[in-house]
Amino acid sequence: MTWTVAVAGATGYAGGEVLRLLAAHPELRIGALTAASSAGSRLGDHHPHLLSLADRIVQPTEAEVLAEHDVVVLALPHGASGAITAALEKLGSADGPTPVLIDCGADHRLTSQQAWETFYRSDYAGAWTYGMPELLHAGETCARAQRTELAATRRIAVPGCNVTAVTLALQPGIAAGLIAASRLTAVLAVGYSGAGKALKPHLTAAEALGSAQPYAVGGTHRHIPEIIQNLEMAGAAAGSTRLSFTPVLVPMSRGILATVTAPMTSALREAVDPDAMLRAAWEDAYGAAGRGESLIHLLPEGTWPTTGAVLGSGTATVQVAIDRGADAVVAMCAIDNLGKGTASAAVQSLNLALGLEENTAITTQGVAP
């Protein structure tokens, strides 16, 4: 069976990366490509690397155009997905079932209306099934429940890219009760594509090259409640998580390196061999030596994640160690923010929703140098 897929927001970075993967998908056929201000132009004017789609004309993002497809991927700015979703569902109620919807924006990620209104300051659109198949649920040592939910859904909310990096770095220790969520510190080196294509003075080459720029400092970043939501899903006590989160733009086009520091629990601190216990928790969650999660690689001991190794791929690399001088655990994760951080997660989740092999069309090989 072949499904048709429309991509709204096709001319942006996230939309382009989704299309790069969809173009190689054996079970999906790319239909309408839509956008707002760039409607009427050639896709090749925006994504010249997508040669097979370069001559396609970008259409306006209208519900009537999108509704003709089996699947719709929404790669739109935050706050824009809710309106188009409502229009699609209104059309669907009159003419039949709505397409499978995948939102790469933030509109449907948060389960708390209060958290949404506090951080996004707009109307709450409701939560969809969370598009991270590897998300641990409390009591799990390997992810099963989230995959079951994705296999039964028609509405998928793709995680935030920074959220993915911090969650994958930390969740095995939370689930195993080895680290406390009461005092977490996350510092992320982030590539500029995460800021989107909109032209802003601080994103120009003259400002960015040779400079590292922190942003959303002091607990203001919108991904904070989503990270907390995930860690509570993995087993952190509700309301107990405290996270200091600082992203820093660095001079690379794509990639995220997350370094998360967390206090040890007494269970880890008093263990006969704390290093082995810690390692075992990450191996239980992700597998070792290529076993387990095929898109998450726990690196050999003493080897640390780098963004270059995952560039262009849908994989994540993780590592964990004890910092005895600080009485803390240091967990790290590297991802491509457009790959595992967005488009690969979208396709991976869609594959589950359609009953296909989970990793179909996901690129696992990086690009180097």
Image (cartoon, rainbow, N blue to C red):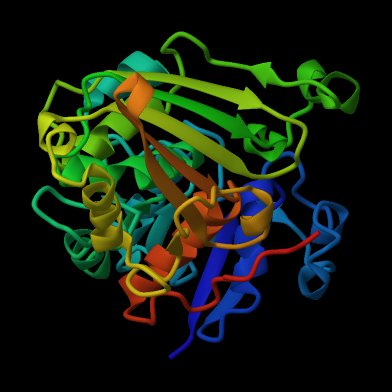
Q: Image point 22% across, 43% down: which residue?
A: 274
Is 113 in front, or is 251?
251
Q: Is residue 75 above or below residue 203?
A: below
Q: Is residue 250 left or right of residue 260?
A: right
Q: Is residue 60 visible?
A: no
Residue at image coords 50%, 50%: 302
Residue lying farthest to the top in this orientation: 218
60 relative to 200, above or below: below
Q: Is residue 141 left or right of residue 363?
A: left
Percent x, y of residue 286: 32, 62
Q: Quadrant of residue 185?
A: top left
Q: Nearer the viewer, residue 120 or 300?
A: 300
State the image quarter where residue 198 is shown: top right
Look at the picture and state if 309 lies above or below 122. below
- Residue 91 percent location from the top left of the image: 37, 56
Residue drawn at 26 percent across, 59 percent down: 285
Give the farthest residue toward the right: 206
**Quadrant in the picture for the C terminus:** bottom right
Task: Assign the N terminus to one quadrant of the image.
Answer: bottom left
Question: Foreground residue, 125 or 219?
Answer: 219
Q: Position of residue 291 (x, y in %)?
A: 35, 75
Residue at (60, 50) in percent of width and height: 336
